[in-house]
Image (tube, rainbow, N blue to C red):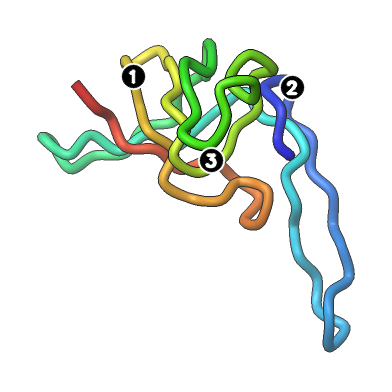
Amino acid sequence: MVKLGKLKRKILRIRGGNEKVVLLASDEANVLDKKTNKAKRAKIKNVLETPSNKFLARQNILLKGAIIETELGKAKITNRPSQEGNVQAVLIE
């Protein structure tokens, strides 16, 4: 599970000898603003809520569907950070 904190990644060997970058902790997200269709890198301040379990939000764990508070405003995580090695989010009103 990806926690809110200083950026920390790990490289794993996967099937076929390939490598996969796994995210362990992050404090930044790539936030897309649908109005202007521009993406910016923003600091994550807090995890507000998670759809699967309210206790994960209390522990500041980043996962798909979680609502986060960024410098640009509230955003929803659209990818699986633990699988992809980064955090992608879409700005919401």
Three-letter amino acid code at the position of disc 3: Val
Three-letter amino acid code at the position of disc 1: Lys
| Coordinates of residue 20 in the picture (x, y in percent) | 76, 65
| Coordinates of residue 5 in the picture (x, y in percent) | 72, 20
Would you identify the image quadrant in which residue 38 lies? top left
Residue at 50% over, 44% down: 64
Task: Work out how far the residue at label 3 is from the one at label 2, CA to CA, in angstroms.
Answer: 13 Å
Residue at 84% over, 75% down: 14
Q: Which residue is mark 1?
A: 74
Please tell me how crowded label 3 is: few (under 14), some (14-19), or many (20+) other residues with Cα within 10 Å.
many
Label 3 or label 1, whichever comes before in sequence order: 1
Q: Secondary structure at mark 2?
A: loop
Question: Residue 61, which numbered label?
Answer: none
Q: In the image, 93: left or right of 57?
A: left
| Coordinates of residue 6 in the picture (x, y in percent) | 74, 22
Q: Which residue is mark 2?
A: 6
Q: Secondary structure at mark 3?
A: loop
Q: Which residue is mark 3?
A: 87
Residue at 40% over, 38% down: 89
